Amino acid sequence: MKSAIGVLGLLVAVACGRTRDEGGDPQGGAGSEPGAGGQSPAAGSGGKLDAGGSGKGGSQATGGLAGTGGSTVSDGHAGEGGAEGDSIPLAESSWNTSLALTVTKSAGIVNINCAATGFTLHVSPSGSNLKAIIGGVGFVQPGELIGDSAGAPTYSVSRALPVPASSECDLESIELTQLALRASDADGDGTADRIGGRGKANGRVVVGDQGFTAELSFTLEGVPDTTQPTLVAPSNPHPLDSVLLRTTEPIALTSSVTLTSTGTTSADQPLSGYTAGNGAFGYFSTPVILPFGSSWKVSATGGDLASLPFDIEALPPIAVLADPGLFAQDGFENTPALTLGGDAKIVTSVGTMGAITGNKSLFVPPDASASLHLARASGTSSVRFTVQSLMNDSGTTVSGLLAEAGVIGGSVRVRYDQPIMSTPSTDTSDNTWKYAGPKQEVTLGLTESGSDVVIRFATPVCRGLCPPARALLIDDLRVE
């Protein structure tokens, strides 16, 4: 039930949906911080997670801890022949952790598929309690485990503790609400070599425009973290999308990530880590508008909270969306240089209504986009164009022309997301786009220096309870 995101990553928040365009990565939005949306894939029950917690088919277990001389049980307690004293306090340590999940109450939602999830758990003592950092792909969540040392050390939660949901899980998010966690030392060296437990959780699922909560039970199994962290890079990011690299687990705050151009003209781009306030980095990003068609090698220092270094040798270079070529700024009259996504296209008319200017205009329907590369002459300071709204119902409010422009090499993105005039409307006699609003001039100011400009047009796409459909007709695009 997770929403698919358009590949160029233009994630513009609208009341009822998202937009799609022609390339990019499913991360949060341009420059936005990923939360539970960056998910850690499910691990096999009791299995060992690989880098990023995506391993399946690790060593099979039923969850739980083996007591000395005893057998493994599914509730995390000491096995037969063992004693509660076999549970030991946890020192600072990192664990590859898996939850075997059972949906106990679906809150009216049927066919919820969520059997397992996995994450990295880092703990450090704080008195009798443990400070915790939980992580998955692009996910970092601090928390606390409450220690009970009245008998064998047991750890619980005093407030709901979020964990990442597997990419194969129908739930948007999971929170642990009850937990009994213990650690065991099978080889007797005084250091825990396995954790296990059981508990309850709530899972949230979104259907249409409604959210529902499912109740879950789980068994927990964890083994020491011995897997190196790596980075999840976007595929063919758009120049206007901030390059965002998600980490496969929480990364130490002393770490760094840098992009180095594989060409000869671009300077290195150091990336900033986020979010330090959570005690670790979950992703690295740069706001710089990278050139069309450029290629960047990723390098990194540091590593995860278990002091394991990055493993990125096999990570391919990041290739920015190919250059469509310079747009002639002739009003789309000749064969225009542009990159189209969805059903965007050049048209000569809509029904009986002709192009805005000359013989051709750019048509951008819902869930579509168009991207262009414009040369900027010295002394120019704005991008200008003419837009006309298209509707299937007369007099409706048309919101959200999503136009965004920026200077290549800069970091400022200028957006226009105001309502487009819909009245007075004109009958087009088109079967789908029956009415057109008046022509409207739009100006996007450029505040940074540079000789190349990139612009992207898109329209909102609605999923759920939606207003009447709308599209855009665009013409007279130029830099002045």
Image: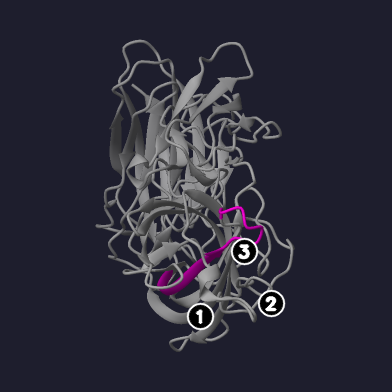
- Residue receiving disc 1: 217
Q: Looking at the rendered structure, which numbered label has been put on residue 42?
A: 3
Give the residue type that dot 2 points to.
Ser
Earlier residue among tags 2 and 1: 2
- Residue receiving disc 2: 71
Q: Position of residue 185 (x, y in %)?
A: 60, 60
Query: Left or right: 417 with respect to 255?
Result: left
Nearer mark to the viewer, of 3 and 2? 2
Distance in Å between CA atoms under marks 3 and 1: 16 Å
Q: Looking at the rendered structure, which numbered label has been put on residue 155?
A: none
Distance in Å between CA atoms under marks 3 and 2: 26 Å
The residue located at (46%, 32%) in the rendering is: 331
Q: Is residue 181 magenta?
A: yes
Give the residue type that dot 1 points to.
Ser
Label 2 environment density (alpha carbons within 10 Å; few <14, some 14–19, many ≥20): some
Which is nearer the eye, 168 or 429? 168
Give the magenta part as a residue range: 175-191
| In the depicted structure, whether residue 330 falls above or below residue 60 | above
Label 3 element class: loop
Residue 68 in which image quadrant: bottom right
